[in-house]
Amino acid sequence: MNKKIVFSIVLVQIFGLVLSSQYESIFNFGDSLSDTGNFLLSGALAFPVIGQLPYGKTFFQHATGRCSDGRLIIDFIAEAFSLPYLPPYLAAKEGQSFQHGANFAFAGATALDAEFFYERNIGKSLFLVGEIGGNDYNYAFFLGGGIKQLQAIVPVVVGAIANVTSELIEEGAVELMVPGNLPIGCSAVYLTLFGSGNKTDYDRHGCLKAFNAFARYHNHQLKQALDSLRQKYPHTRIIYADYYGAAMRFVHAPLHHGFYGGTLKACCGGGGPYNFNNSARCGHTGSAACENPSTYSNWDGIHLTEAAYRYIASSLINGSSSTPPLMS
Ligand SMILES: *[C@@H]1O[C@H](CO)[C@@H](O)[C@H](O)[C@H]1NC(C)=O
Ligand SMILES: *[C@@H]1O[C@H](CO)[C@@H](O)[C@H](O)[C@H]1NC(C)=O
Ligand SMILES: *[C@@H]1O[C@H](CO)[C@@H](O)[C@H](O)[C@H]1NC(C)=O
Ligand SMILES: *[C@@H]1O[C@H](CO)[C@@H](O)[C@H](O)[C@H]1NC(C)=O
């Protein structure tokens, strides 16, 4: 459970020296926010429902291991660069070609999964990926960690992200994109588990203020760390992906962006005010998916819908939520 990824690292590595605006391959590291099938290929024992509908019901019309109804941010980025969808690394044994890159994202990845990569001798940078999981925050919050307590580990998590980023640069990466945290205070799972009787705990859109402040705190530190890396490696292009700002735009004006079902309530779930019920999570007995997932931004309480990912991806691609712009 709790396969949410708050952030992931996307490494966009350029091999073409002349056509510098055209990427030929993309390598992605992260967890369930960008996993295109590794967790499912590994057996998905902790989260078997991602191997069946309604996961994948939009676009693919079958479950692919993506933690959404359809495509993820990374899929829309691949489309934008006219590249095939990133094959999960674990598809290697099925004869998958990695000519255009590979996806090392792994749903539920936390520091512990580093061993998984290491054992397969994929390389040093991959070894560090598992240590980047935003799941480190999720698990800690869900186990009862307080916000003050967790603020103390932000520098450690940000330091780990910065370390992976510099490792990749030392390995030759020149173009990198590093996303920040989503507004977790607007997420159905947080709203359900940490709901409050005190109205002052919510902003005017119904999000939990303290959790969004936590996400901004993480993002602020991450941006500072990326600034240091840009100074240290002036030949690189390190893009900050503002997932928070992109998502807040549809939280602020759901109807304007076509989210008629709202942005706080999950499309697929087992009841409750946010349609997130830990005893009947999406895909389990007692849950149901909404008729039209494209009118919801939250898919299963934890992950977002294809429609929300499409919106965030296009904000990155057109430069409104990427600094410097992803496509220049
Ligand atoms: C980052 O790397 C530095 C230098 O190798 C190391 O001292 C530090 O502990 C690392 N930080 C994290 C959070 O992994
Ligand atoms: C609600 O929270 C605010 C700010 O923390 C506090 O000042 C106020 O006393 C609380 N109200 C109730 C009814 O608990
Ligand atoms: C949550 O799911 C359980 C198991 O299906 C069910 O008994 C319960 O009524 C549900 N709660 C809500 C608030 O819908
Ligand atoms: C970028 O894309 C987002 C999402 O589709 C859209 O809301 C925004 O207006 C676009 N901005 C520009 C400058 O095109």
Image (spheres, rainbow, N blue to C red):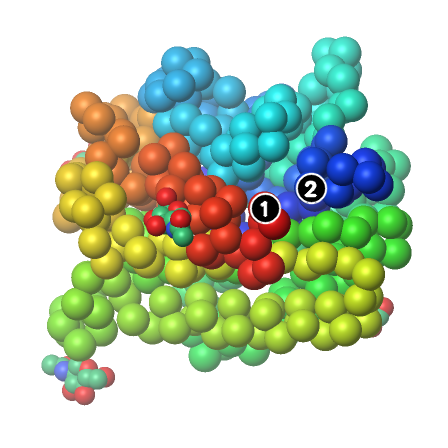
Disc 2 element:
loop
Q: Mark 2 points at which residue?
A: 21
Relative to 17, 259 lies left or right = left
Q: In this view, does 229 lie above or below 41?
A: below
Residue at 70 percent of width and 36 percent of height = 23
Give whichever of discs 2 and 1 has the lower sequence position: 2
Q: Quadrant of the N terminus?
A: top left
Q: Say if residue 316 shows up in the picture.
A: yes
| Rendered image quadrant of residue 204 | bottom left
The number of numbered badges drawn on the structure is 2
Q: Nearer the viewer, residue 11 or 193?
A: 11
Quarter of the view holding residue 230: bottom right
* Residue for point 34% across, 35% down: 307
Left or right: residue 281 compared with residue 85:
left
Determine whether label 2 and label 1 are within 8 Å by CB. yes
- Distance, label 2 to label 1, CA atoms, is 7 Å
User: On residue 327, which mark appears?
Assistant: 1
Dot 1 lies on which element? Answer: loop
Image position of 243 with respect to 294: above or below: below
Q: Residue at horizontal 75%, vertical 42%? A: 20
The residue type indicated by label 2 comes to Ser
The location of residue 313, given as percent across then percent down, is 47, 42
